[in-house]
Amino acid sequence: MVADAAPSKLAADGPRGWTSLPLRAWLARRLEALAIPVGAALVGFLLFGLFLAALGKSPLQLVDIVWRGGFGSPFALGNSLQRAAPLLFAALCVALPARLGLVVIGGEGAIVLGGLAAATAAQPLAGLPAVLAVPLMAGAAMLAGAVWIGAVGWLQAYRNVNATISSLLLSYIAIALANHMIEGPLRDPASLNKPSTLPVGDAFMLGPMPVIGVHWGLGCGILACVIASILMDRTTLGFAARIAGGNVRAAQIQGLPVGRLIVGFTALGGAFAALAGYFEVAAVQGNANGTLAAGYGYTGILVAFLARQNPLAIMPVAFLLGGIEASSGLIQRRMQLPDATVLVLEGLLFLVVLLSETLYGRFKPFNPHLWAQKREAVPA
Amino acid sequence: MSDDLGLWSVPLAILGGAIRVSTPFLFVSLGETITERSGRINLGLEGTLVFGAMSAYATAVLTNSPWAGVAVAGLAGGLFGLLHGTLCKFPKVNDVAIGIALMLFGTGLAFFFGKPFIQPPAPPLPAIPFGAWSDLPQVQAALRVNVLFLAGAALSVALWWGFRNTKAGLILRVVGDSADAARALGYDVDRVRLVATGLGGGLAGIGGSYLSLYYPGSWNEGISSGQGLMAVALVIFARWNPLACFGAALLFGGAGALGPALQSVGVSQGYYLFYAAPYVLTLALLIATSSPDRALAGAPGELSLSK
């Protein structure tokens, strides 16, 4: 899907572009940003195919199963989109702080706490009209996530505590805290085999979106990606964040509030991640239970890195990975492979895409400054 | 004499637990100390630990020798370390991000190949009963010390001495503190870091073998819950000093043993909260020992973590 978009754009703009150097330069840079990650992902799939072939399994069968299990039918597509929804939010929790140079890998904790906060908030709100209660539940979730991941940003900005490590520790603490609440004080006495909180109630549950039939988390996730993209690329705040992420000292000299930017971006990321938990509770599970920590936070890290921290690119990548994860069950049954097969593929993709960072700026067709060098070989 | 020690059994269990639980922390943190002293950080040791646990268990099941398991785990961990070191040699490749990817990759591979080994039992690593003088079973249990723990203790002393007094230790520190100075002296910075990351991975793999072959002593997919990453935090707390790593590992082991110890005397409320004690302790120590306006004392100058 992504790969197709580029050549068609080139074909449309090509003839005009040939006359204007700035346009060609712009196109070349865009094409580089698309071709390298797509190429790297293809290499990753190829390596995984070799891995499977070495074990005596057929890579082509895997492609076929992933197609049928994740994309080939309306049911499979719906399943993939349903899995993509939390990944959109979880990836934003990585991409937003990344703009400031922070590697936050604790989104899982914000998801779990967000779900728990939404389920807890539903109880005192019972009786209110859903129009009021639904935003309040979502707000409670966002607040919990914003405080949790915002604390990671605060610790980095004001105490110099490494955000990667503190966010993962806080994530473990959040999961322990949520397990304690779900199996202790907040436990629904009626939930015997599967400890969970009291149900949020049918009145506050979200239905599916019209036409595609996937819950509203998908629509809101796409909206969140668009909002994040506008914030990061089209506002002064996003510009300030990029400066602070590139060079803290330069940003401070310019008088930018680096600390507040870091806290703000991490808190927003946490609020988005918490929404993933909110939708799991209010659109899928109906209460908060142990399945909230299903690993969406960790896959979200992968999504964000594969998308190179670009909120718009997060959407197709989340869809792709949602489809791969949706076909995991089918892979196990049809190919007699363990459930960790998808983890191996994801790890491999992750490594290859990170390694491809080294290729940027090396290919001449993609890099206008290299064309110019050749052309102006004789100094003026 | 009575078997019932009452509340005294809690500190005793924590002491025993500290010795038992700390060994993986100790090996991972010593390995990470070597890596970070060279100026790189490898967050992938969590994945290495899990893969080490799996490969050690599988080897022990197949060969019936726990020591072969330890050796294979060390080798496999070393390969993961070399992979990290090789990938990070390329310009613009971020060592922290590669570490996160290796965490995922190592865990995935371990689960992938470890599936058939969840059921069969493996021979455990031997332990030395230092508590044999006592009649109390609790004391005996607390003082059964595994050989790997003693090896780790010896290794931390050896590394502490080696960093200061050997040529290799000096080269490692120069590379970690200033790559430019090391290049000016004619050392190949990338190669030193490659070796340091490989050694670090090897030690983390051995730490993993302890998990599956001694305590908890079985292979399953929940065998490590962030010990590899906590050990990285522990290195910061220990200020890149191997001797301090030993003390810190004991402290973390004790915190990890708090939950089970309280459970054994009947405190069942808040099990999950006690279980979170090591994470809270790690975070609290990180916050307490970090400073907003200066780099960490003792930090290698080239480390991206402290820049």
Image: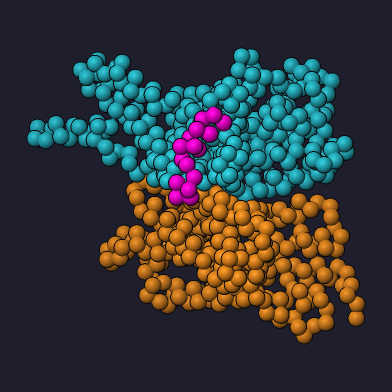
Chain colours: A cyan, B orange
Please state the horizontal and vertical placement of residue A315, each as a whole percent of the image. 51, 27
Q: Is residue A311 above or below residue B252?
A: above
Say which of A379 and A134 sits in front. Answer: A134
Count of picture labels: 0
Q: Is residue A52 above or below residue B284?
A: above
Please state the horizontal and vertical placement of residue B276, each as a whole percent of the image. 71, 53
A367 with respect to A223 (left or right): left
* Quadrant location of the N terminus of chain B in the rendered image: bottom right
A378 with respect to A317 (left or right): left
Quadrant of the image occupied by residue A198: top right
Residue B91 part of the magenta segment? no
- Identity of the residue drawn at 49% across and 73% down: B159
Please state the horizontal and vertical placement of residue A246, each as a whole percent of the image. 41, 40
Q: Is residue B203 above or below residue A41?
A: below
Residue A55 part of the magenta segment? yes
Query: From this viewpoint, is residue A296 visible?
Result: no
Please state the horizontal and vertical placement of residue A187, each as a whole percent of the image. 83, 39
- Identity of the residue drawn at 64% across and 59% down: B219
Q: Residue furthest bottom?
A: B133
Query: From this viewpoint, is residue B73 visible?
Result: yes
- Identity of the residue drawn at 47% across and 57% down: B80
Q: Which residues are magenta?
A: A53-69
- Identity of the residue drawn at 11% across and 35% down: A377
What type of secondary structure mainly makes up the magenta span?
helix
